[in-house]
Image (tube, rainbow, N blue to C red):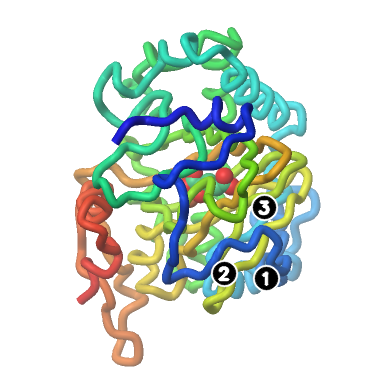
Amino acid sequence: MAMTNVQEMSMNGEQPPAEYIVKESRFGSIDSSPPLADEIPIIDISLFSPSSPQYSEQAENHELQKLRSALSSAGCFQATGHGISDSLLDQVREAAKQFFALPVEEKEKYSRTIDGGFEGYGNDVIVSDKQVLDWSYRLILRVFPQDQRKLHLWPQIPNDFGEMLHEYATKIKLMMGLVFKAMAKSLNLEEKSFATQLLGDQSLMQARFNFYPPCSRSDLVLGVKPHTDRSGVTCLLQDKDVEGLQVLIDGKWVRVPIVPHAIVLNLGDQMQIMSNGIYKSPMHRVVTNGESMRLSVALFNEPDPETEIGPVEDLIDETRPRLYKNVKNYGRINYECYQRGEIALETVKI
Ligand SMILES: O=C(O)CCC(=O)C(=O)O
Ligand SMILES: [Fe+2]
């Protein structure tokens, strides 16, 4: 299948070619404006930190309740009180914008074909000729462990890109630590129940910068097809102006609103496994916009491939038997399933 140039087609207002057109899907048709999600609350995560000035036990308990209810239904929430400054968030968005605005030849210097792996700039990896392609480009970079960075794939333009990504990812990692503790607390578990595996020394963090050019037929294509993240947890910085993310809740798509300065936190499959299915890894997708481009920056956390994960023992009992096997390298399982068109979580069920 010849690789088409989404950006060129977008600029010329061309009709999307057949390989981008979403035919029927078991997840329903494309609707760019379904209802807003009531189930996705705004949670002030500073209330999980006893050292914060707003902290009180009562306020924390209230927020923990909200957390538990959000993660067991929607599998995501909007985090405020994360302590990351607006100016840094804007800098991250701005760096992404500048990178994607570079001429194609410039971006190709960081192409994922250079190393032949997953990292770098590009669009969908084609694994089957039946595949429907996403109307988007992405830049994927491993940020942690630090010694695994492929710096030759990190953009030089803007020139503070590397510094910015390091600073942002370091802050997000701290935030994840706080959220993992709160998640454990919300399930009456020991504080370290998730963090030990998910935030160990060799744990991974992958950055994915997503760029969605406008599409004249946004009713026919998707920026990202329905999927669950393979991660433990994903922190997503949405575009400041253009919506696009939708989450499937109780079989219905809902829009995730833009909340200025909030970071969308959604769980990935590995957290669904560790929580023995109590917390959900939500199915989500991205619709394109007829007029405006959209950007987002996702940071995915996961354990190192050698670390075994499985349901936390205290979440298994007679009323809730173990739902998942223990697994290592879920990233690989997920990729192999993707190639075969299977759902990875289903294959690790007992
Ligand atoms: O662009 C978005 O809002 C979400 C992107 C996403 O789901 C992903 O990168 O896994
Ligand atoms: Fe995702």
Image quadrant containing the N terminus: top left
Q: Quadrant of residue 321?
A: bottom left
Q: Is residue 234 visible?
A: no
Q: Position of residue 293 (x, y in %)?
A: 67, 35
Q: Which residue is mark 2?
A: 74
Which of marks 1 and 2 precedes in the sequence? Answer: 1
Task: Check the image and report above or below for 9 versus 50.
Answer: above
The disc at residue 69 is none
What's the CA distance linking mark 3 and mark 1? 16 Å
Dot in front, 3 or 1: 3
Tell me: 328 left or right of 6.
Answer: left
Task: Check the image and report above or below for 269 versus 20.
Answer: below
Q: Position of residue 18 (x, y in %)?
A: 42, 47
Q: Amino acid at mark 2?
A: Ala
The disc at residue 61 is 1
Q: Amino acid at mark 3?
A: Ala
Q: Position of residue 34 (x, y in %)?
A: 68, 67
The disc at residue 79 is 3
